[in-house]
Amino acid sequence: MMFNKILPQLIQLTSSVGEVMLSFYKNDLTIGIKSDKTPLTIVDQRAHQMIAERLKFLTPDIPMLSEESSAITFEQRLNWQEYWLIDPLDGTRDFLEHTGGFCICIAYIKNHQVIFGLVYEPLTGTHYYGFDDIAYKQHNNIQTRISAVSKRQPLRVITGHHSTHNKNLQQHLQKLGKYQLNYLGSALKFCKIAEGIYDYYPRFGPCCEWDTAAGVCILQNAGGSVVDANGESLQYNTKDDLLSPDFFARGLVIDNLN
């Protein structure tokens, strides 16, 4: 896959999907509840449809797994060597609560590793993407290379609005020494570390592979790291369920983290 060639079309696609999202942003939406007790709206479904149709046109031979197509069985996925992994609206609860912390995530998986990631933040019109050991931020048609260098103290920790009462997280934070706690929804947390705004994102509790892949790829290509509790990189499409393990995302240099 030549990501440089397809990138402009993916940027155009996510920009269009983002416009549709924003047209619904301040409206009262009918909210459904999925089997995992997370919310589902017409925005999730419309975004999924737009992305699925375009990717099928651009890469007809590459399968796609989306949060909204997660009924695809492991038996079907088992032999996939490469595929698109999509979260059409990452941060649905933040979208509904108007916190601004929502985005579109598109990742490409090859041999259980993420090798391309794109995250689009509709409210600011900002794209983040990473592949081939380089990560970028694009805003107002200006592309800037980003680097996840973290030098400041106290440690700037970022977590989700809905993670504040997680006991494992609270215990972990107590071990960090001096830190500043910040809140942001969705995979944007990875992106903000990738551009050096925050330093560290510890995640305890359930999330899925489509929640992590694109952001992980951007952060890793910006020089940061994302590892599980055993210090291993995250793997994709290796098991029946699509849950990601607890993980720790950080910038390149963190002086006050053991």
Image (cartoon, rainbow, N blue to C red):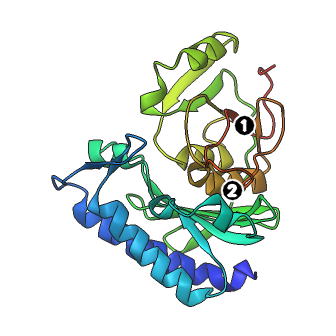
Residue drawn at x 69%, y 23% is: 153
- Closer to the chain start, of discs 2 and 1, is 2
Marks counted in the figure total 2
Snapshot quadrant of residue 118: bottom right
For residue 218, the mark is: 2
Residue drawn at x 27%, y 62% is: 42
Snapshot quadrant of residue 142: bottom right
- Amino acid beneath label 2: Ile
Mark 1 closeness class: few <14, some 14–19, many ≥20 residues within 10 Å: many
- Amino acid beneath label 1: Arg
For the residue pair 253 and 258, the one nearer the viewer reads as 258
Residue drawn at x 77%, y 29% is: 229
Q: Hey, which residue is sitting farthest left in the picture?
A: 28
For the residue pair 40 and 36, the one nearer the viewer reads as 36
For the residue pair 28 and 194, the one nearer the viewer reads as 28
C-alpha gap between disc 2 and disc 1: 12 Å
Snapshot quadrant of residue 41: bottom left
Q: Check whether the beta carbons of the residues at disc 2 and disc 1 lie within 8 A of each other.
A: no
Left or right, 205 with reference to 238: left
For the residue pair 123 and 232, the one nearer the viewer reads as 232
Residue receiving disc 1: 250
Query: From the viewer's perspective, is residue 223 above or below residue 80?
Result: above
Residue drawn at x 66%, y 80% is: 62
Element assignment for label 1 = strand
